[in-house]
Image (spheres, helix red, strand yellow):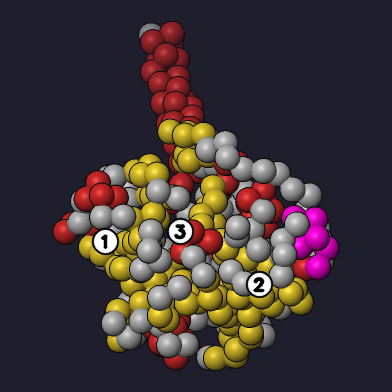
Amino acid sequence: MSVQKHRKNLWPWIFGILLTGYALFTLLNTFLIPHDVVTWAEIEAVEPEFSAAEYATEQEIEGEVTEDSYVSDEISIRITTLNRYNTWIYVADIILSDPSYLRTGLAQGAFGRNLTEKTSTIAEDCGAILAINGDFYGFRDTGYVMRNGYLYRTSLQDSWYNEDLVIYEDGRMEIVDERDSEAEILAEAGAQHIFSFGPGLVKDYELAVDEETEVDASMTSNPRTAIGIIEPLHYVFTVSDGRQAESEGLTLYELAEVMQELGCQTAYNLDGGGSSTMWFMGNVVNNPTSGTTAGERGVSDIVYIGK
């Protein structure tokens, strides 16, 4: 009887060990172990830590360069700083001669779950002039993903808004509902990039969110990243600081108001929080923070301007 009783007492321990092991594996599988990797090898590595002028020289990027602007015959970028809602907001006003200068880059040069690098690292590897973090597609299993004309994922996202941003080969931006738009049809229509974080902020110059709208993982003022278009080939990249005494952060509604104030016809919310980063010519422009630690965190992808 004592042996049988001893065996019975072991089962809760064994079950507990198995349950703990499964929970640990689930966390690793969700956040650390790479999945479904698709290699994208057309990236040239560059050395980091340049001033704007040094970066332009090293990359053989021709144009007039200052610490907050870049102007050439093909690309004009001017970065300004606003303060709205007790928050510092960094705005890159971009005018392109050709839509192909608006591109996307992937962490480690590949598509896959849990592949991450800092925005600055991806930007430097891509030889970018300007970059912001993308939609962190690798944190989710669902939602359309298209980058530089290649369709990586076609599964419908499961959030309540289901809104994607489509950037077409002619430079147009459109916000679509995945439930009404098949990824393959968007590709046939000339889509080059599809982002599935969302939601849309501005549609036809009108606010597309209200004061109650929030993304699933964020219910308060936070660092934010957004992209918008003012007119053909005239874009805006916006990043706000947040979770800091001197910069509280924005709600989605406040972010939408900023994008509307900047004159956007269409504007879209990208991943925010600790991901929110703007990088220009070798330097991080804003002050990224996760709330507990300062500095950049790894992300899946970036949106950038480059030749």
- Residue 203 in view here: yes
Which residue is painted at 40% across and 48% down in the image? 149
Return the mark for residue 162: 1
Front disc: 2 or 3? 2
Q: Quadrant location of residue 168?
A: bottom left
The CA distance from mark 3 to mark 1 is 13 Å
- Image coords of residue 227 (percent x, y): 46, 71
Q: Which residue is mark 2?
A: 72
SS type, badge 1: loop
- Image: 196 above or below 256: above
Instruction: Name the foreground residue: 54 vs 227.
Output: 54
x%, y% of residue 91? Answer: 57, 80
Residue 166 locus on image (x, y percent): 34, 61
- Label 2 neighbourhood size at 10 Å, few (<14), some (14-19), many (20+)? some
Q: Quadrant of the N terminus?
A: top left
- Marks 1/2 in contact by CB < 8 Å: the verdict is no
Foreground mark, 1 or 2? 2
Q: Which residue is mark 3?
A: 135
Q: Nearer the viewer, residue 73 or 116?
A: 73
* Residue 183 horizontal side relative to residue 221, left or right: left
Q: Nearer the viewer, residue 93 or 16?
A: 93
Name the residue located 62 percent from the left edge and 72 percent from the top edge. Answer: 73
Say which element carries label 2. loop
* Of callouts 1 and 2, the N-terminal one: 2
Tell which circle, 2 or 3, labels the residue nearer the N-terminal end. 2
- In the picture, the quarter occupied by the C terminus is bottom right
Q: Is residue 179 magenta?
A: no
The boundaries of the magenta stretch are 53-59
Q: Is residue 148 left or right of residue 210?
A: right
- Residue type, numbered disc 1: Asn
